[in-house]
Amino acid sequence: LGKKDPKTLYSMSNLAQVLRDQSQYEEAETMHRETLKLRKEVLGKDKPDTLTSINDVALVLGDQGRFAEAEEMHWKTLAVKKRVFGKKHPATLTSLSNLALSLDGQRRSKGAEWIYRRTLALRLEVLGKLHPDTLITRNNLAHNLKDQHCSRAAILQMRRCFQLRKQILSS
């Protein structure tokens, strides 16, 4: 197949993810960056797999506490995804949510809260209230509010999340 074959690149990405899942962040970052470089070269910079690789690098940077670097990559990915997929596409909303995580990591809680709320509204509209991504966003918003000492609002969001998850499990 060769190093530049899309199937090889897919396998590299999967291996990098396994390394990340095992908290081997430096190795995961190296492999994600190599995959990104090759995907840009082989597929082009605006292709879905390339955008996934950019996201993967940003996430592993966040895992290492390098939130400012992650934020920069999330902004770039978000801009491309809005242009390529549209502002309400699930892939675009994932980038928006990941951007909020990087802001939260930098203790920029108000900015993260605004993005979580925007992402939640869009995911409710596009995916519905029971979709796992919608529930994750609601959960992240609740934790953000808790960290800002907005206990009442945090409890409200977490209760809603709990009720919806319970509804899913009981059906």
Image (spheres, helix red, strand yellow):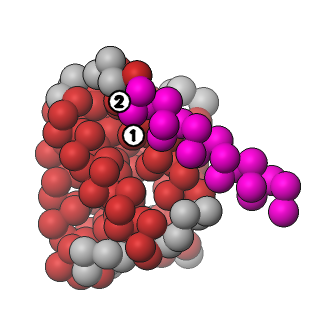
For residue 155, say whether it is visible. yes
Q: Which residues are magenta?
A: 152-171
Q: Which residue is mark 2?
A: 145
- Which image quarter: residue 61? top left
Q: Secondary structure at mark 1?
A: helix
Classify 88 as above or below 133: below
Please identify the quadrant where the N terminus is shown: bottom right
Disc 2 + disc 1, Cβ < 8 Å = yes
Coordinates of residue 4 in the picture (x, y in percent): 41, 70
Type of the residue with mark 1: Leu
Q: How much space separates mark 2 and mark 1, taking CA atoms?
A: 6 Å
Coordinates of residue 17 in the picture (x, y in percent): 54, 46
Type of the residue with mark 2: Leu
Please identify the quadrant where the C terminus is shown: bottom right
Q: Secondary structure at mark 2?
A: helix
Q: In the visual, does 135 lie left or right of 141?
A: right
Q: Which residue is mark 1?
A: 141
Q: In the visual, does 166 lie left or right of 37?
A: right
- Which image quarter: residue 72? top left
Label the magenta part by its dominant secondary structure. Answer: helix
Q: Residues within 10 Å of mark 2 (few under 14, many from 20)?
A: many
Relative depth, front residue between 34 and 143 = 143
